[in-house]
Amino acid sequence: MAGSFFEVWQNHIDKWYVTDDSASGNGYSLLDGLFSFSILVGQCIILYAFIGNLSLIKYLCLILILVMPIMYYKKILPFLPLTIIGVANTITAYLIFGQEVIFLQFLTIALTVIFFNKLIKPRISSIMD
């Protein structure tokens, strides 16, 4: 819920118009950083709930939570921690539940990235027009 709050706040500042110059389009602002960090913490909590008995998971989550704000601020692979934890969650969920449908989230993520890239280029991205 915290992540959604930060994302909506940033979109409101950008007047719901996504361009490659806006924080919503280029992904770099305090609010978008807080959004991404909230998502990372939530994903770590989920992974910890799945297999938190493994020390590797405890340390992985701790390291990612500590490193992500620095990586985001310095713009050095800022979404790598989210990618690592997302892939770990997906594989873990598959191993626990044995349902292949869990891998569909990779398709939806890819489609979202493609959609936003198409949306930004022609500058027809306002839902308020």
Image: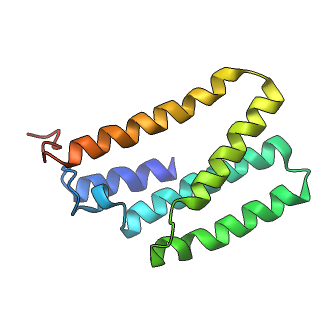
Q: How is the image coloured?
A: rainbow
Where is the C terminus found, in terms of image quarters? top left
* Residue at 48% across, 52% down: 3
Q: Is residue 79 above or below residue 102?
A: below
Where residue 102 appears, as percent x and y from the top left, is: 65, 27
Q: In the picture, residue 119 is in which quadrant?
A: top left
* Residue in front for this viewpoint, 76 or 51: 76
Where residue 115 appears, as percent x and y from the top left, is: 31, 37
* Residue at 81% across, 32% down: 95
* Residue at 24% across, 41% down: 118
Q: Answer with left or right where residue 22 lies relative to residue 109.
A: left
Q: Answer with left or right where residue 125 lies relative to residue 99.
A: left
Q: Is residue 46 above or below residue 96?
A: below
* Residue at 44% across, 48% down: 4
Where residue 18 appears, as percent x and y from the top left, is: 22, 51
Q: Is residue 36 above or below residue 102?
A: below
- The image shows a total of numbered marks equal to 0
Q: Answer with left or right where residue 104 lies relative to residue 115.
A: right
Q: Answer with left or right where residue 44 lies relative to residue 73.
A: right
Q: In the picture, residue 81 is in which quadrant?
A: bottom right
Q: Is residue 24 above or below residue 73?
A: above
